Image (spheres, coloured by chain):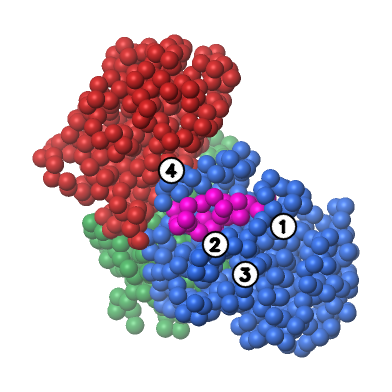
Chain colours: A green, B red, C blue
């Protein structure tokens, strides 16, 4: 686990994803980060996700779009939850899935990852879903795969988790329709969060009015200034008049360590209660990537309350992952981008 | 593992399944226990199982009945064997299956089970196959799922294991045709057996002439009197003139403990030998849910002998599970119940 | 793990496969070993593999040949890599696959294996893919299965690994066209290698000009004389004028033990470098079953160099396994054998 190290210090080169994600026609080929992708590309992902939302309500929850394609779940870091959503998304597109849990030390670094990739390529795998504790792992793989293969980043170190960010954007769009007027607050451990970075890039690209982060100073990254966010140190001022609240998941095993307060102290200052939520707009929507630690990040009354869209996020997660899979494999044309 | 506790003392409310299993039209919606289900419903399960028995003999062992449905195996207690039979049954109905082994302490109780369920619901899962060490777990989940979702109990604590009981009923019907004249003896650790309870309810509902249990007193539950069975303390009188012998599986790891004799002592008194089997009718059929401990519950000569229908039980298990899946999801109409 | 014992000393009877693999019409029914199979049968496997090679290049990488068939991966010894290739091959033939990892002590010997087999038969499984640490395990199962079931040996002890051998033969044929003029050298730990035995039988049956083994004396089996090979103790003379070099995988955990030198010493004498490879023909092709220990068995420059066909072996492995599955289940007729 090098996720506690700074991204730049990992074994993989610092990500340089500007051109890597798009093909010559400007179409999505890999999906590694929301950073650097245009509003048009992000909007296309949501449009396709919207079209797939209906699939889950059909009697037969399947489309034959990726029939005969082979998708490999390459999880170097365990995550039953995230893997299950990719697995389901792939099955609903009629793809074949092979699951490879490689959460062992020997085969998780540079050369041996390449050997694994080369072997799976030789088996004519079409797509890699990559989760890895090191920042840049998905980029590293994307730089080395054969031209016809797509790589989707399912979370790399503290760098990016772009499908989570896009399912959040898709959820916001379904509830709020338009991004333009929105004030969005992200609350929690920004420093260690790959989700927060991907969300901030996406929210700014989609043109929200304001992105705020609310966190103790010790949980802010050193490059916060360059992220295009407003920083708040308390919920009262930070939540004032916001339309969307995005809670981050706290890694309980980290609480009480050097940088972090105890669970109790954290909840005292940053835990979301119904009372505190009243600082925000009445129709504020509350988001959380799950699983929730009730009583740590937020009260059960908020998590299960009328403003919560947490379960809609889960539903939208399947459609969003289906969209990213179909788009990167070139099996979906919306006709909206040239 | 709270399976050693009395059902009423578990963390889940005492099961109340009377109305929970049927929908407004009296059709099976969940399958949690054989207790309280009518003869008509049990018979319909066997009729549909009969129709699926042919599927496994076709060149293409599949029907498209549940294509596009998503079935989640929720095994809070490990059981490769049982899970494999549900997995196969689902595949032969063309459903998509996701396997979630959650045999870890943190996520197996009340609130966190509900969170897991809510998340899987949000992923548009259609059916949960639930195995749990606590009695009442499947009922608990059934009481909380969305209206379109079906729950099948794959074994909860010492409470019920209804698909095992129904595959046994189906096997008896295929061999003996009619339940009316049958004397059936269940031998072994009735106290700890979820299977025995489900069998006794089903046998009585289907109208067999007599249900006997043969066991040492220490392995009888305190409510034996209310179960509608005749109790025997030895094989000689208990097996006299019976048509069907159902052996229970002994948990070897429990043998020699407070309530239980050693394996050797047990076999001396209750082990089924060819000689002892001769007390029963000549065409008695011998059943066991597997895996068999040869030399503990019965001699190899009996397990593999001409009266054994143990492997037919396995075959019938697939058809029975297909039937329960298809019926609860409303994708099978026999026209026999209104 | 009894793979360190001599085959004859295992719990299974010495393999006797002459007639076991073929049905009355001389067609392949099981695939347990290359030993004793005719040139015609081996050629048919390669012909069918050739026809399946195209499938992986189609947009839809699937054929419906084994739709509705159930294939059980019975891996008594862990091997994610090999299992994945069989899994993929089965999925590309549209079969349903159930994975049973039984790498636990209790259920891996004689009687309990039979119980497992009988149960899976009763579930109407059509094919067993068997990997086991004991030589003869796949034969044992093949001798006991029902007439309609096929068994494929995915590696048993130090005895045989015939699908690996056949993917190697298929790779050689694709590169060299004809076996007749070829000199083939196998380098490494012949003694412990199930692959080497299967390769030697196949190469001799297919009529290559010469099979050589290059190994330290301590890594040669006692019956080397009867294998129909020429033995060389050094790379310089052994590689002279050869067309194909097959490297065996070294079990690093064995290095430095009684019979084996250290990794460093081994590489000094038997490691394949570019310089040493120059003793062979210029168009020599270099093979390895993977995963490669670079710097132990061979230099990275050789493994990734122009003569290496190692990744082609992986690709051909899927087609070969598809061929063996389709042929043994009688779902492919080439019309070439009567």
Front in this rendered view, residue B113 or B132: B132
Q: Which residues are magenta?
A: C125-152
Q: Indicate which disc, 3 or 2, sits on the residue closer to the N terminus.
A: 2
Q: Are marks 1 and 3 in contact (CB under 8 Å)?
A: no
The quadrant in which residue A26 appears is: bottom left
Pointer 3 residue: C37
Q: Name the residue located 38 percent from the left edge and 64 percent from the top edge.
A: C67
- Label 4 and label 2: CA atoms lie apart by 28 Å
Residue C191 location (% of width, % of height): 79, 60
- Label 3 and label 4: CA atoms lie apart by 38 Å
Residue under disc 4 on the same chain as residue under disc 1: no
Residue under disc 3 on the same chain as residue under disc 4: no
Q: Which mark is residue A215?
A: none
Pointer 1 residue: C158
Pointer 2 residue: C30
**Mark 3 packing: few (<14 Cα in 10 Å), some, or many (20+)?**
some
Q: Name the residue located 31 percent from the left edge and 54 percent from the top edge.
A: B55
The subunit carrying tag 4 is: B
**Mark 4 packing: few (<14 Cα in 10 Å), some, or many (20+)?**
some
Q: Name the residue located 58 percent from the left edge and 77 percent from the top edge.
A: C40
Q: Indicate which disc, 1 or 3, sits on the residue closer to the N terminus.
A: 3
The subunit carrying tag 3 is: C
**Mark 1 packing: few (<14 Cα in 10 Å), some, or many (20+)?**
many
Helix, strand or loop at mark 1: loop
Q: Is residue B245 left or right of residue A155?
A: left
| On-image quarter of the C terminus of chain B | top left
- Label 2 and label 1: CA atoms lie apart by 19 Å
The answer to whether B248 is drawn above or below residue C216 in the figure is: above
Q: Is residue A152 visible?
A: no
Pointer 4 residue: B83
Front in this rendered view, residue A218 or C148: C148
């Amino acid at each position: 686990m090098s996720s506690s190290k700074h991204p730049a210090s990992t074994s993989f080169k610092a990500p340089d994803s500007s051109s890597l994600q798009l093909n010559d026609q400007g179409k999505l080929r890999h999906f590694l980060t929301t950073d650097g992708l245009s509003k048009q590309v992000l909007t296309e992902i949501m449009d396709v996700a919207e079209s797939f939302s209906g699939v889950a309500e059909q009697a037969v929850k399947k489309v034959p779009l990726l029939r005969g394609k082979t998708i490999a779940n390459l999880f170097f870091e365990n995550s039953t939850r995230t893997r299950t959503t990719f697995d389901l998304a792939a099955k609903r597109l009629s793809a074949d899935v092979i699951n490879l849990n490689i959460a062992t030390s020997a085969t998780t670094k540079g050369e041996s990852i390449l050997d694994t990739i080369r072997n799976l390529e030789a088996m004519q795998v079409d797509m890699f879903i990559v989760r890895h504790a090191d920042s840049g792992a998905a980029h590293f793989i994307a730089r080395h795969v054969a031209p016809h293969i797509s790589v989707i980043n399912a979370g790399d170190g503290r760098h990016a988790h772009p499908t989570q960010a896009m399912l959040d954007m898709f959820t916001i769009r379904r509830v709020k329709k338009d991004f333009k007027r929105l004030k969005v607050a992200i609350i929690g451990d920004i420093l260690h969060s790959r989700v927060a970075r991907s969300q901030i890039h996406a929210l700014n690209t989609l043109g929200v009015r304001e992105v705020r982060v609310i966190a103790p100073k010790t949980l802010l990254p050193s490059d916060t200034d360059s992220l295009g966010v407003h920083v708040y140190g308390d919920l009262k001022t930070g939540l004032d008049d916001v339309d969307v609240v995005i809670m981050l998941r706290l890694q309980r095993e980290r609480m009480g360590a050097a940088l972090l307060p105890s669970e109790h102290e954290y909840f005292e200052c940053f835990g979301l209660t119904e009372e505190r939520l009243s600082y925000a707009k009445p129709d504020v929507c509350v988001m959380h990537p799950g699983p929730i630690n009730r009583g740590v990040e937020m009260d059960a009354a908020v998590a299960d309350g009328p403003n919560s869209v947490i379960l809609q996020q889960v539903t939208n997660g399947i459609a969003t992952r289906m969209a990213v899979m179909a788009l990167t494999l070139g099996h979906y044309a919306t006709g909206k981008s040239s």
